[in-house]
Image (cartoon, helix red, strand yellow):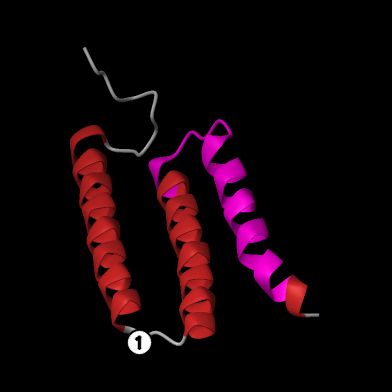
Amino acid sequence: MNMYYWLLPWILFICGMMVFVSNQKHLLSMLLSLEFIVLSLFIYLLMYLSVLDYEGYFSMVFLTFCVCEGVLGLSMLVLLVRSHGNDYFQSINIL
């Protein structure tokens, strides 16, 4: 039963990567899949730190960086919606 606990974050990570790599049309769904990947890595980090009997300070630093990444993604989403009216990747003109 203990093996399944170590396998679960990796399954979550692979599922999140499959959603991220698949052809997505909306920026919001891409950001949600990235947050899902970050949460699976956080679960694995907590499990790893609990086995080694380390303090949880590193997990707080990890969560701080994850929150900053999420805020940056949401600000880009708001900027895109205000400038183009939707969050489709096809509406963005790179050139």
Where, quadrant-wise, is the N terminus in this rendering? bottom right
Tell me the kind of residue under disc 1: Glu
Give the labeled residue for mark 1.
Answer: 55
Q: Is residue 80 above or below residue 15?
A: above
Residue farthest to the right?
1
Q: Nearer the viewer, residue 25 or 44?
A: 44
Residue shown at 70% from the left, 65% from the top: 7
Q: Is residue 69 above or below residue 18?
A: below
Residue shown at 31% from the left, 68% from the top: 62
The magenta segment is 4-28
Q: Quadrant of residue 66?
A: bottom left
- By secondary structure, the bulk of the magenta-drawn segment is best described as helix
Tell me if mark 1 has few (under 14), some (14-19) or many (20+) residues whose alpha carbon lies within 10 angstroms of its own. few
- In magenta stretch: residue 34: no
Determine the secondary structure under disc 1: loop
Q: Quadrant of residue 12?
A: bottom right
Where, quadrant-wise, is the C terminus in this rendering? top left
Residue shown at 51% from the left, 72% from the top: 43
Q: Nearer the viewer, residue 29 or 48?
A: 48
Residue 73, position as x, y percentages in the image: 28, 51
Q: Is residue 52 above or below residue 25?
A: below
